[in-house]
Image (cartoon, rainbow, N blue to C red):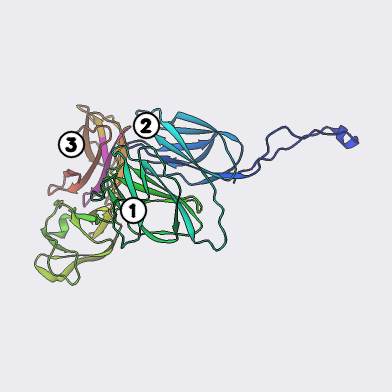
Amino acid sequence: MKRYLTLAVVAAAIILGGCVKESSLPKATGVATIRALNAIPRSPDFVFLIEESLLGTARFQTATQTAEYDDLEYNFNFETVLAGDVLPTRVATEPLDVQADTDYTFIISGDFTAPDITLWEIPHREWSEGDTLLEVRVSHLATTQGMIDIYIADEMTPPALGSQVATIGLGDFSTAIDLTAGDYLLTVTPAGDDSTILFASDPLTLSARAQFSISILDPSQNDTATVAATIVNQTASASAQLTDSRFPPTIRFIHASMSLGNADIYTDDPLTTPVVADHAFADITGYYDIVRGPNRITYTVPGDTGTILFDVEELVGQGAKVDYYVLPTGNGTDITRGDVPDRRAVDTRARISIINAAAGRDAVDFYLVPSGELIDEATPFVGNLGLSQGPFPFPVAPASYDIYITDVDEKIPLAGPIPFAPDFGDFVQAMILENVQPTEVDFVFIPQP
C-alpha cells in the first residue's frame, strides 16, 4: 500500500507563536485494489504504471499482480515495445479518481499500438465471519466467439440449457454469482448450445469469503482449447491461467546424441510396448499423449528391456506440449531434458530457439547475417553457445538472413550459409548437431506442432 506524507516546512516565526494553515492537498480516506489484464492476441507485453511507478507487466492472457493504492486521482499509463524499437512507447493513458473499497481491473484490448482501455469496477464485499459464500463474475474477452453461456457446477452436473449462470457477449462482465465454497467446474459453450464445449476446466477450489473474476480469452499457440481462461482471486490478490481438462499433455522425442545409438522409448511401467521403437540419432517424433503429473520415461537398447539407457521421471502439467531431448555432454555421457517452449506468436518480432548439441565442442558461435553477406566482419548473433545448454529463445527482426555456425571466435563455417526468413509472429526451433565430419556440424530446424 502506497501512502503520501506531506511535510510542512515552517518558518522560525512559528516557534515564536505564529500559526500554520492546514495543507490543501487531498487526503486519502481508504484504499482500492488495482490490476491490468492483457486481452490482445499476438501482442507484446504491456508495462502497467501508476503515474511513473511500475505496477507490473501484463503479457497476453495474464493479469498483473494486484496493487493497493490510496483513493486519490492518478494517471494510469500503458507502455509496450513496438516493432523495430528497443525502448517502450507509451500507447495509452487512463486517468482515474480512485474510490476506496473498490477493485479495479484495466482491460487492454483492440490494437496494441493504440489499445482500448476498459475499466471494470467491483465494490469490495464485506463478509460475516462464518460466511460460507463466495462471489464470482465472468467476463467475455474472446474475440473469436459470439455470445457464450457460462456454467459453474460440481463434477456430477453436466452443462444443460437453463442451468447456465450467465449468458454474456464480447466485452461484457456478468453480474455477481454467489456460490457456496467448494470445488467447481467451469464450462463455456456457445449461447444456446450446451453440446458444443469451448472450454471445460479442471476442478477449481473456490474459497469462502472471497471475490473471483474469470476472463474468457482467445487462445494462443500454447493452448489446446477453443478459448482460454484466466482467474483472479481479488481478495487474495492472486491469479492463474486455467487449463482445459479434455486435453492431455503431449510429448515428442528428439534424439540429439550420436553416441547414444538407437533406442526404444517406453512411458509405461512395467515396460510392455515402446511408444517409440528404434529411435535414431537426429529423429524427431510426432506428439504422443501422456498423463498429467509424474511420467516414467525409459530408454532401452532396441528390443532389450533388460538394458536400460535412461530411466527418468518427468513431471508434466495439464495441456503442456513437451519436447524431450537426449543430449550429449562434454564428459562423454548423455542426459535427457524436457522443455515446454513458449510458442505464443507476437506481432512485433519473430523468435528463434536454439540448442547446441554438437558433441566434441564445448561451445559454438551462431551468426545471423543479411542474405548474401559474409561473416568476416560480423559479430555473432549468439556467441559462446554452450554444449547442451538451453534451448534458448532469441527475438529477431523479420528479414532474409543467412545462418552460419563456427567454433568460438573463429570465422571458418562449420555450417552455413543456411537461408532463414522469419516473419512477424514466427516461433522457430532449431538444433545444432554433431556431424560425422569433424570439421562440420548440422543445423536442423525442428517442426512446429
Tell which of 444 and 190 is nearer to you. Answer: 190
The picture places residue 280, in percent across and down from the top left corner, at: 12, 56
Q: What number is the disc on residue 163? A: 1
**View extreme (front): residue:** 162
Q: Nearer the viewer, mark 2 or mark 1?
A: 1
**Label 1 sits on what residue type?**
Ser
Q: Earlier in the sequence, mark 3 or mark 1?
A: 1
Report crowding for label 3: few under 14, some 14 to 19, many 20 or more residues within 10 A (C-alpha). Answer: some
Residue range highlighted in magenta: 348-367
Could you say where residue 277 lies in the image, as x and y percent from the top left? 10, 61
The answer to whether residue 328 shows anywhere in this view is no
Find the distance from the CA under tag 3 to the CA under tag 2. Answer: 41 Å
- The residue closer to the viewer here, 320 or 186, is 186
For disc 3, the marked residue is: 416
Q: Which residue lies under the disc numbered 2?
A: 110
Whole-percent x, y for residue 256 in the image = 19, 53
Which of the 4 image quadrants contains residue 293?
Answer: bottom left
Q: Is residue 132 visible?
A: yes
In the figure, 140 relative to 360: above or below? above
Which image quarter: residue 171? top left
Q: Dot 3: what SS?
A: strand
Q: Could you tell me how far apart the alpha carbons at marks 3 and 1 are, in whole angstroms? A: 61 Å
Residue 362 located within the stretch drawn in magenta: yes
Residue contact at pointers 3 and 2, CB within 8 angstroms: no
